[in-house]
Image (tube, coloured by chain):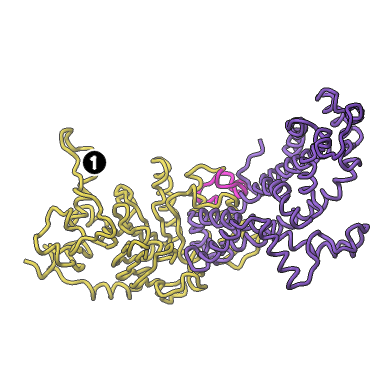
Chain colours: A purple, B yellow
Amino acid sequence: MIWYIARRILYLIPTLIVVSIIAFLVIQLPPGDFLASLISKAEETIDQAQVDALRERYGLDEPIYVQYWKWVSGIVLRGDFGDSFEWNRPVSDLIWERLGLTMVISLFTLAFIWVVAIPIGIYSAVNQYTIGDYLVTVVGFIGLAIPNFLLALVLMYIAFRYFGQSVGGLFSPEYIDADWTLERALDMLSHIWLPVIILGTSGTAALIRVMRANLLDELSKLYVDAARARGLSELRLLFKYPVRVALNPLVSAVAWVFPALVSGSAITSIVLNLQTTGPLLYRSLQAQDMYLAGSLILLVSILTIIGTLVSDILLAWIDPRIQLQ
Amino acid sequence: MQPTPTKLDSAADAMISADESLLAVKDLKTHFFTDEGVVKAVDGVNLSLKRGKTLCVVGESGCGKSVTARSILRIVPAPGRIVSGEISFQQRNGAMIDLAQTNPKGREIRQIRGREISMIFQEPMSSLSPVHTIGSQIMEAILLHLPVTRQEARKRAVSMLELVGIPRASEQLDSYSFELSGGMRQRAMIAIALACEPQLLIADEPTTALDVTTQANILDLIRDLQQASGMSVLFITHDLGVVAEIADEVVVMYLGRDVESGPVDAIFHDPKHPYTRALLQSIPRYDSRDRDRLYSLKGTVPHPFDRPSGCPFHPRCDEFIHERCNTVDPDRYAAGTAESVRCLLYSPDED
């Protein structure tokens, strides 16, 4: 097991190198650069000498591999992700808190999805083709079909109208720029349920279907009958055998749920005015703020890779059928 | 000399109350209520099993053998349900219980499953959990029914594995089903089934999915264990060779009914029902001449929704009596050495 983990971690290195190259190339793909988009938006004309001076200052006239090397060596050697052109600040100043909040929201959402979807999925499978199952199915499909941003608007209205909560953002106004204290954390927790529900709805609906289908497959297996013929009670039987087996694929799904939450939440985060990476990435891509955008894409990719690793290790741990040779 | 044929109802009643009888199924009907209609998978089965004996249930695929077996343990899958009938079983303490009346999810039947009646299934590949060790499944059965500690249960599990002939039993206890061969898995299933010394073992085609050599080994094992423990075996198979080898009594089923039942010798040497005769004629014989064509039963088992009127076998029967067999539903009649035959040929009312 330890060797397996060590080998998997070793494999991370080439993967990360490739990912960093792709992240950088993707940022370079659109025509023009940060200066071009700056000039196009500027109201007065900027003379060519000024542009050349800026271009030299940002290192935009150097060949692409030199730019890439500067960026990557900075990250690896000094933890320096470069500067954001638009914000005029180091990228690392901008992203860490946002990345942290994104992680917090994602983990809460993941927990929400699992806690809600797994019991409902089990209920739905065990009571297949009953009124309860149909009800869950209908509600599930509605949840799947409603776009997140629309749900965000509706729930914001409800939160504001009926609960009198300050909507938008993760903090009450007085805590937005405050330092991290217990009060600020509690304030965040009282706001976080709204984005968690909004971001989790479609995932929950999808997972209910997955759990239901997985469990239905397992329920008709002979080992379930065999365990029942041994005299096990229905409830113990259900959780010890078919549910246990049906959960395995969900563990491997953690890896893809995670990046979907991080990147898919951009529009919702803009609507909700969340201080997460989504809106920042969106803005930086529009402005061709290459070091900021590249760093965000790189970090999200790294999170995905780590998520895959964690889910693979978990799966190897809980499923004896996976051979570690 | 043939005794005069009589109706058997009173005789069947007497059998159930006989002391040596362990299990008596009377007119069991298990139907499946699907969206397309009602499938009468089991539609009036009678069988009885004495202590220490082996009863073989034979018939083609889809004749309701497995559903009968599952009905006894009340593990018929939805949308199946026992509609009527009686399953009298004598418990260890001597009390009689009608299993057909128990709640399939209730405590009563759960204390019988695994403790008084155990079952092994057709496919040893899928009847063990893929993610639990063999040991955890044996110990589960032991801990569920016997007042022992985990350590004692583990010891018992090891000795069960030794009993069924699994080598290096204490190591294999911690292996998973996918690490064992098909034959070893079926041995492990037998170990689980017998862990609490049940009075009755139901074996639902336990050798069908195994190769011939392994089949013979498993049959020998079941027979040896039966002799050692004195348990009864209800053996379900479509293989008449297996029946000849292990059965004391035989019930032949067709379309959810017992068509003929009796001692194994009577069934093989003096079959009464045209269906039983046809089945026996379909076995290839080593002493037949090269040019003889193997007999094959005409037609196929009818679709469950399209059950023939009268005797359900009449469209395929060589001795079909026009206007009788397709209108009259035959009762169970005594005939010769057979205990009962469901065929108008043996009805006292027919000439």
Toward the viewer: A278 or B97?
A278
Q: Secondary structure at mark 1?
A: loop
Instruction: Point out the stretch of residues depicted in magenta.
Output: B161-178
> Tag 1: Cα neighbours inside 10 Å, few (<14), some, or many (≥20)?
few
Q: Residue at x 24, y 73 (%)?
A: B11
The answer to if B173 sits in the magenta stretch is: yes
Q: Amino acid at mark 1?
A: Pro
Q: Quadrant of residue A215?
A: bottom right
* Number of callouts: 1
Tell me residue B319's x, y (percent). Answer: 12, 55
- Image quadrant containing the C terminus of chain B: bottom left
Residue B138 appears in the picture as rendered: no
Q: Quadrant of residue B17?
A: bottom left
Tell me residue B309's x, y (percent). Answer: 19, 63
Toward the viewer: A166 or A197?
A166
- Image quadrant containing the N terminus of chain B: bottom left
Tell me residue B59's x, y (percent). Answer: 29, 54
The residue singled out by tag 1 in the image is B284
**Residue B138 left/right relative to B251:** right
The answer to if B335 sits in the magenta stretch is: no
Toward the viewer: A164 or B183?
A164
Q: Quadrant of residue B136?
A: bottom right
Tell me residue B14's x, y (percent). Answer: 28, 75
Indicate whether A61 appears above or below B311: above
Q: Residue at x 18, y 53 (%)?
A: B316
Check the residue under mark 1 and report the chain it is in: B
Residue B331 appears in the picture as rendered: yes
Toward the viewer: A143 or B332?
A143
Q: Residue at x 39, y 72 (%)?
A: B100
Residue with the most extreme top position: A63
